[in-house]
Image: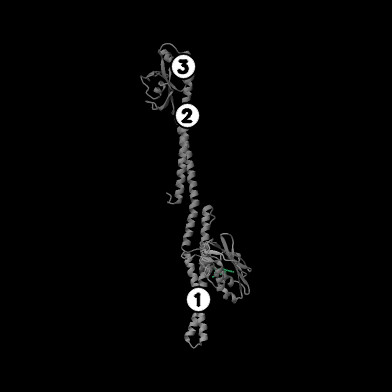
């Protein structure tokens, strides 16, 4: 007995389908052959009757007598058949065997013949139990005399031939079934074995062994499944690596301000410093605390986005105002590297969005641009309409750029080209998700050593402020 499972399902289905098909074909074939054999016996007899009938009227005449009956017998007799001459009520009057039992024939062929058609009956003969076919026909010998002539022919030989044919076709059917069983086992194994292998490897992966790989050159869907699982394991290893990098970089990011806060606070506790020094120490503590808050907020934002919990406060807003605020916020940082910030935005462009969240996106993009640009360079922020329904904000720098291999991954969470640059690797991932929440797109182009261009595409709105103009801050 085959164990429950796909193998058994495949084998049983195959066997069932082929068995039913074979059975149908064989039954139809054997029935057709039997009908053909029986019909040819019948038609041979009926042809003989009609040829004999043609000459009947010229040959037989006179009164009803044994002589007349003998004449009928001689006239209609046929090789390999027994001929009986019956009265219309079915009594045997004479027969070609000469044996005339005082019998009345009651089989269905006689009333059919009396009714005017050629009667046919197939069955077992009483007494001998031999398989026979009886063909009967009413003939008019003279104006008064009618007889039923009844041919009886043995079907034993035909039945024997048919039995041999049946046995032969059962033999062929059995051979076909054996081939089908072997083939279905082969097919089932070709599916089940790789699946068992894949299940075993995935069980190892589920236990955390992501270095396990599905080996074997599988084809079609199973091949796809194997390579998808292998790919999944690669991705898990990669994201684990990225997470490990993140933990080490975030620890570093947290450690630096904490060390400085701790150092200054201990120094200040020990006392004896003049107000100028105390002010400097407190300033550093405050700045480093801000940095820590910024970091924690970034991580909180990310977790909110991951859980779809970030709610936007959508208002009608002028993008130019947000860009101006962004520049003001980053001005001091850019100034330190003597980086020139340029805003290119001719007129007001209205969109519907969350100004604080969009400012967070642009701040992150410009902050990256400042971080990765050389001193004395320029960063251009431009806003322009792309079509009646879309606008774009472009942040372009001429900094270190990003290689092609890294460009597709910089928007992945926690990814950083170089962890020593500081940051969490979450900025672009968060920015992209905020832009997508605004039904927009974030695209990146970059060339290593030449610079980077980030394009934020956002939908435009036809709505205009109802008041004379938007308030000072540019939002409704
Ligand atoms: P973070 O800046 O906190 O590390 P981001 O998601 O903002 O995280 O950026 C991911 C990485 O993409 C950065 O670490 C940096 O390697 C690269 N990157 C982003 N913007 C730029 C840029 N303008 N020029 C060069 N590299 C960039």
The extreme bottom residue here reads: 272
**Percent position of residue 277, x then y:** 52, 85
Q: Position of residue 15 (x, y in %)?
A: 46, 44
Label number found at residue 316: none
Instruction: Tell which quarter ligand 1 is in.
Output: bottom right
Q: Position of residue 440 (x, y in %)?
A: 54, 62
Q: Secondary structure at mark 2?
A: helix
- Which is nearer the N-term, disc 2 or disc 3? 2
Q: Which residue is mark 2?
A: 37
Labels 2 & 3 near each other (Cβ < 8 A)? no
Q: Circle 3 is placed at which residue position?
A: 75
Q: Position of residue 6 (x, y in %)?
A: 45, 51
Which of the marked residues, 2 or 1, is nearer the chain's N terminus?
Answer: 2
The image quarter containing residue 454 is bottom right
Mark 3 neighbour class, 10 Å CA radius: few under 14, some 14 to 19, many 20 or more: some
- Is disc 3 placed on a helix, strand or loop? helix
Q: Residues within 10 Å of mark 1 (few under 14, many from 20)?
A: few
Reading the image, the residue beneath label 1 is 290
């Amino acid at each position: 007995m085959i164990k429950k499972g796909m193998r058994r399902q495949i084998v049983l289905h195959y066997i069932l389908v082929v068995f039913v098909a074979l059975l149908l074909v064989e039954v139809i074939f054997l029935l057709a052959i039997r009908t053909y054999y029986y019909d040819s016996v019948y038609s041979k007899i009926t042809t003989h009757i009609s040829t004999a009938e043609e000459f009947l009227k010229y040959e037989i005449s006179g009164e009803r007598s044994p002589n007349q009956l003998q004449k009928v017998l001689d006239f209609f007799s046929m090789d390999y058949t027994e001929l009986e001459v019956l009265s219309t009520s079915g009594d045997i009057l004479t027969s070609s065997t000469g044996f005339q039992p005082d019998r009345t024939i009651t089989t269905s062929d006689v009333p059919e013949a009396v009714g005017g058609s050629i009667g046919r009956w197939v069955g077992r003969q009483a007494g001998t139990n031999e398989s026979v076919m009886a063909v009967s026909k009413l003939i008019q010998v003279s104006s008064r005399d009618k007889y039923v002539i009844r041919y009886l022919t043995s079907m034993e030989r035909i039945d024997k031939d048919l039995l041999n044919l049946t046995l032969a076709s059962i033999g062929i059917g059995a051979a076909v079934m054996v081939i089908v069983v072997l083939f279905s086992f082969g097919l089932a194994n070709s599916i089940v074995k790789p699946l068992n292998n894949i299940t075993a490897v995935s069980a190892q992966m589920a236990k955390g062994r992501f270095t396990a790989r599905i080996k074997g050159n599988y084809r079609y869907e199973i091949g796809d499944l194997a390579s998808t699982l292998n790919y999944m394991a690669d991705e898990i290893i990669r994201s684990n690596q990225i997470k490990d990098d993140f933990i080490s970089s975030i620890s570093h990011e947290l450690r630096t301000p904490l060390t400085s806060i701790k150092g200054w606070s201990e120094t200040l506790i020990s006392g004896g410093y003049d107000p100028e020094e105390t002010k400097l120490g407190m300033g550093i503590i405050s700045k480093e605390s801000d940095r820590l808050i910024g970091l924690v907020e970034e991580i909180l934002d990310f977790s909110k986005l991951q859980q779809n919990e970030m709610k936007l406060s959508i208002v009608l807003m002028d993008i130019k105002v947000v860009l101006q605020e962004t520049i003001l916020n980053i001005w001091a940082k850019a100034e330190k590297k003597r980086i020139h910030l340029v805003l290119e935005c001719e007129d007001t462009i209205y969109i519907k969005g969350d100004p604080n969240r969009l400012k967070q996106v642009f701040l992150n993009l410009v902050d990256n641009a400042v971080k990765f640009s050389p001193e004395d360079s320029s960063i251009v922020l431009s806003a322009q309409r792309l079509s009646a329904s879309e606008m774009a904000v472009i942040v372009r720098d001429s900094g270190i750029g990003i290689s092609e291999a890294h460009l597709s991954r910089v928007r992945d969470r926690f990814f950083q080209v170089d962890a020593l640059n500081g940051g969490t690797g979450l900025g672009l991932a968060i920015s992209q998700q905020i832009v997508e929440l605004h039904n927009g797109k974030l695209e990146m182009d970059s060339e290593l050593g030449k610079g980077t261009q980030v394009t934020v595409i956002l939908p435009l709105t036809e709505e205009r402020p109802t008041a004379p103009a938007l308030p000072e801050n540019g939002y409704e």
